[in-house]
Amino acid sequence: MELTKERLLFVDSCVSTHRSRTRQLCDAWIRRFRKEHPGAVTDIAVAEPGVVQPMDRESILLRNELIQQRDWEAPMFDLARQFRRADYILVGAPYWDCSFPSVLKIYIENIVVSDLTFRETEQGYEGLCPCRELTYITTAGGPVGEMDLGYDYIRGVGRMLGIRNFREYRAEGLDIRGADVDGIMAETLEKINHG
């Protein structure tokens, strides 16, 4: 196979108090991706406190000033620049409270930057990110059903930033009494391994 210069960004928000099942699925997806895209560079953004900071009044004012100056090399924009240069993006996040952990929302606050990852036009938002596909992986203790608000939100933000292709893998019902956890995980892994 021909080597590529493609970039994968793994947004790791697999918050867990045990061995993360979401992370297990993400690791399987990354293994398949690397086989299909030999030579691709993998960047990782770990969405956790200390790495991402919530926007407050002071940081918003600083961001606005840096945007006006078009100072895109400012450290505040490191995550946004990393996101913008990705050809493929994988977001891993457990299903919490109908969506995902709050630290992922904080990460998103840090990458949605006017004139860097999107611009405002008379017709609405124009995305500036050339990502070919964003994949979202989640696991849930209970049933998700139609309440997959995390994936809906990620697709909405992704479209705003210029992404048009999305895919989701989820394993749900993992903590229901009597659930065949190994079977549920194996079924989801099978879907991941066969794209």
Image: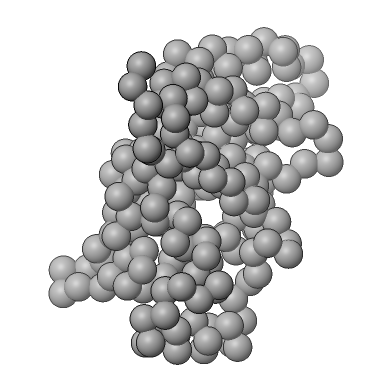
**Residue drawn at point x = 45 percent, y = 54 percent:** 83
Q: Nearer the viewer, residue 183 or 175?
A: 183
> From the viewer's perspective, is residue 138 above or below residue 115?
above
**According to the image, what is the colour scheme of the structure?**
one colour
In-image side of 138 versus 72 (left or right): right
- Residue closest to the far right: 17
**Residue drawn at point x = 46 percent, y = 49 percent:** 154
Q: How many marks?
A: 0
Q: Nearer the viewer, residue 187 or 144?
A: 187
Q: In this view of the protein, can residue 2 be seen by the observer?
A: yes
Q: Nearer the viewer, residue 105 or 77?
A: 77
> From the viewer's perspective, is residue 71 above or below residue 160?
below
Quarter of the N terminus within the rendering: top left
Q: Nearer the viewer, residue 7 or 139?
A: 7
Q: In this view of the protein, can residue 148 be seen by the observer?
A: no
**Residue drawn at point x = 63 percent, y = 71 percent:** 54
In-image side of 51 versus 68 (left or right): right
- Expressed as whole percent of the image width and height from the top left, the position of residue 104 reads 60, 55
- Expressed as whole percent of the image width and height from the top left, the position of residue 122 reads 16, 74
Q: Quadrant of residue 140?
A: top right
Q: Quadrant of residue 84?
A: bottom left
In-image side of 121 versus 183 (left or right): left
**Residue drawn at point x = 67 percent, y = 33 percent:** 23
> From the viewer's perspective, is residue 19 above or below residue 75?
above
- Expressed as whole percent of the image width and height from the top left, the position of residue 119 reads 28, 70
> From the viewer's perspective, is residue 31 above or below residue 153?
above
- Expressed as whole percent of the image width and height from the top left, the position of residue 56 reads 61, 81
Q: Quadrant of residue 185?
A: top right
Quarter of the C terminus within the rendering: top left
